[in-house]
Amino acid sequence: MSSRVREVIIIGSGPAGLTAAVYTARANLHPIVLEGEPSSTSDQPGGQLMLTTEVENYPGFVDGIQGPELMGNFRAQAARFGAELVTAKVTRVDFSAQPFKVWVGDVEHEAKTVIVSTGARALMLGLASEERLLGYGVSTCATCDGFFFRDLEIAVVGGGDSALEEATFLTKFASKVHVIHRRKELRASKIMQDRAFRNPKIEFVWDSQVVDVLGETTVEGARIRNVVTGEESVLPISGLFVAIGHVPNTSLFTGQLDMDEAGYLLTQAGSSRTNVDGVFACGDVQDSTYRQAITAAGSGCMAAIDAERWLESRHDAPADIAETPRNW
Amino acid sequence: MADSNITHLTTATFDEEVAGSTEPLLVDFWAEWCGPCKMIAPILDEIAGEHAGKIRIAKLNTDDHPDIARRFDIMSIPTLILFKNGTPELRIRGAKGKGQLVQELQAFL
């Protein structure tokens, strides 16, 4: 059993969770952040930016900043104000009654408010051969593994911003990057499309799907099906990078928090409030529209302020909170 | 970053360290630009400290020593290879939490 009921527990440690941590820590709410566990997927402490290189659109960094460095800064800033950071993954929650309960294995934490910022993770193709060759040519992390494909021909699956960003990044190493997309047009932003179309090393494979990854101990090719003609062909490649979109990390909250059909948490318009009074959601876990580091950080700030006001309204907050100046 | 329990390998020292280690030697193939590698570095240091005498942990920077990385077909980092008497016995792909790493290494701890 935990020794005390906390003011706030934050689940997740991407831009949303750590911004909520900075704000709630500065408001003397002594937040604990259950960060998650290391992995080579985007579901890990620091979130999706841990797998990116240059972040060019986060305001305040004139020349850009590396994703992991930016998240290291977020974390250090939260720690500076006394946020307690625990590198562990939440295994179960109970939001049915106050105080809310959150478990990491057998360890139970209790709190009056919970801020959910578990983010979203990259989808995989779901092929047995993909899983078998993961780490042997199939990769979930272009920034980690791109270097090992110097002068080789590789492919990226997907047609959104992250796919084109990976493809563009990978041209630094690979001799050629095929972008395999199931449609004829891209979802990616104009600037990313322009960059990719201008890049002589990038070649598009339209209307196509990867149906198998070939090779015994390393990737030797991908079997591709044209979704219009049904025709199958083999693309000889040495590496396959998957960037086909994201799915929210919400299985933990099934039956407790309201979600849309895709699994994104629902929040009340203009706030971070979920259907459970005292539980707030921020970042990509509740945002299938914008999904930017800066919007995640902004919504993390909203969740912190919502939680603080909720505690104030219940007269449960520590006495010094009422005097917290609003000049944040 | 604390890594007081970790040996840093180079192309020059790799073979000697791997062959000469009396305990099983876990080598962490990593690079500066790899986020997940940085996440597991403190965990590996803890494991090395907690299981001193049973296992040794070393790291090899694949950027500085690509020849060694190539020799072991490293195509993804972090990759951890456990050597016993100089022979690779176990290969762990990708970053993992401490609990899971300890579990996968259990036979050698």
Image (spheres, coloured by chain):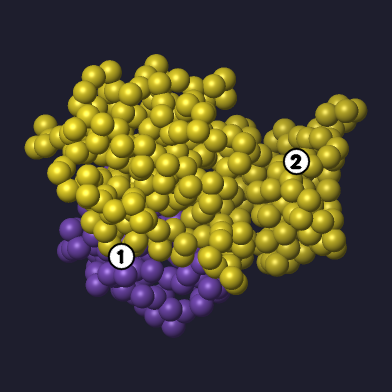
Amino acid bearing label 1:
Ile
Classify mark 2: residues with Cα within 10 Å, few (<14), some (14-19) or many (20+): some
Residue annotated with mark 1: B57
Residue in the foreground of this view, choosing between A174 and B11: A174
The chain letter under disc 1 is B
- The N terminus of chain A lies in quadrant: top left
Q: Are marks 2 and 1 on the same chain?
A: no
Is any part of residue B43 visible from this angle? no
Chain (yellow): A
Q: Which residue is drawn at 62% across and 36% down?
A: A289
Q: Which mark is residue A187?
A: 2
User: Image check: A255 left or right of A203?
Assistant: left
User: Image check: A197 left or right of A269?
Assistant: right
B11 shown above or below B5: below
Tell which residue pokes out farthest to the left in this image: A3
Amino acid bearing label 2:
Arg
The chain letter under disc 2 is A
Q: Which residue is drawn at 36% across and 42% down?
A: A305
- Would you identify the image quadrant in which residue B45 lies? bottom left
- The C terminus of chain A lies in quadrant: bottom left
